[in-house]
Image (tube, helix red, strand yellow):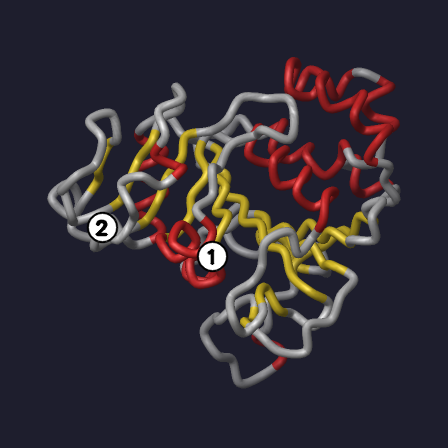
């Protein structure tokens, strides 16, 4: 039985501030500490902390309104989930080896993809930009000691320290499974797919996401951009029904940790 199975989901951001440094420093060893185990939010990060298999672990994260919107019709989406949701996102970054975003996210938000809100090292930054539309002055390209990787066919203008991966390495390298394999071959075993919605949808459709974190903000936008755009289904019996655990964050957001490798009934759903 994991910590999440014990049914403790109400969390305190301030209490967890004392637990988090132990998780960052000791990783899985921290789970032997009774004080760490006593905090319900520890269970949310347990799968990442315990992962030690040869198979990469892929986590996707998205924030949305109650009515399933990730942005207004004009594309405004920054801080939709507030402070607690942002802290969670930065904690995920601190526990993974690489964070992946599509070029649309870079063009819309110019993210730094760092862990500046929490303790912990920043991961390798990976952008999928097939045609090379990213500004060469984008924040993710800043030289700060972190590995930077771009999946792109356009070789022009990237800083010297940025590794470019294109189809000359693998004709199908832009397919989610091949992209994950390319990152794993470079030592990145725990991977966060952070956005945008189209990129996350592609990875889910390809069966490459192990865990999906969905942060629900207590707001209703009424219109705007939808969260996911997966392959259509005709029958409810074909819907993805992951084993999910809710966590009530202390600013009213509800975070769902969805295990896409287990169904709601506990049966295997894909490879373990």
Q: Residue at x 53, y 67 (%)?
A: 228
As drawn, the label of residue 196 is: 1
Is residue 3 depicted above or below 235 in this figure?
Answer: above
Percent position (x, y) of residue 250? 85, 44
Q: Quadrant of residue 170?
A: top left
Is 255 left, or right, of 224 in this rendering?
right
Residue 27's place in the image compared with 205, above or below, is above
Residue at image coords 64%, 14%: 25
- Taking depth in this image into account, of 107 and 149 the one nearest to the observer is 107
The residue labelled by disc 2 is 132
Quarter of the N terminus within the rendering: top right
The image quarter containing residue 188 is top left
Q: CA distance from mark 1 to mark 2?
A: 17 Å
The answer to whether residue 211 of the structure is visible from this angle is: yes
Task: Locate residue 106, reporting x and y percent.
Answer: 40, 50
Q: Earlier in the sequence, mark 1 or mark 2?
A: 2
Q: Residue drawn at (54%, 71%), measured in percent from left and top? A: 225
> Extreme bottom residue here?
234
Q: Nearer the viewer, residue 269 or 253?
A: 253
In the rendered view, would you say 30 is above or below 250?
A: above
**Disc marking residue 256:** none
């Amino acid at each position: 039985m994991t910590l999440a199975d014990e049914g403790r989901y109400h969390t305190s951001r301030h209490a967890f501030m004392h637990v988090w440094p132990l998780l960052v420093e000791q990783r899985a060893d921290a789970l032997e500490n009774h004080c760490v185990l006593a905090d319900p939010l520890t269970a949310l990060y347990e799968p990442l902390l315990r992962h030690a298999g040869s198979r990469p672990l892929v986590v996707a994260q998205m924030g949305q309104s109650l009515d399933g919107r990730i942005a207004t019709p004009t594309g405004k989406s920054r801080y939709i989930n507030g402070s607690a949701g942002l802290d969670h996102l930065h904690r995920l970054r601190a526990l993974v080896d690489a964070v992946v975003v599509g070029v649309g996210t870079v063009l819309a938000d110019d993210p730094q993809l760092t862990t500046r809100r929490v303790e912990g090292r920043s991961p390798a930054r990976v952008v999928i930009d097939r045609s090379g539309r990213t500004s060469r002055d984008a924040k993710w390209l800043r030289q700060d000691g972190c590995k930077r990787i771009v999946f792109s066919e356009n070789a022009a203008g990237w800083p010297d320290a940025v590794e470019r991966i294109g189809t000359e390495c693998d004709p199908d390298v832009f397919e989610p499974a091949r992209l994950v394999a390319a990152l794993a071959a470079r030592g990145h075993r725990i991977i966060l797919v952070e956005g945008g919605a189209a990129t996350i949808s592609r990875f889910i459709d390809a069966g490459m996401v192990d865990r999906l974190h969905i942060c629900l903000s207590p707001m209703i936008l009424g219109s705007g951009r939808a969260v996911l755009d997966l392959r259509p289904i005709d029958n409810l019996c074909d819907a993805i029904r992951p084993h999910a655990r809710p966590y009530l964050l202390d600013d009213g957001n509800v975070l769902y940790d969805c295990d896409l490798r287990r169904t709601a009934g506990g049966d295997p759903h894909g490879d373990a």
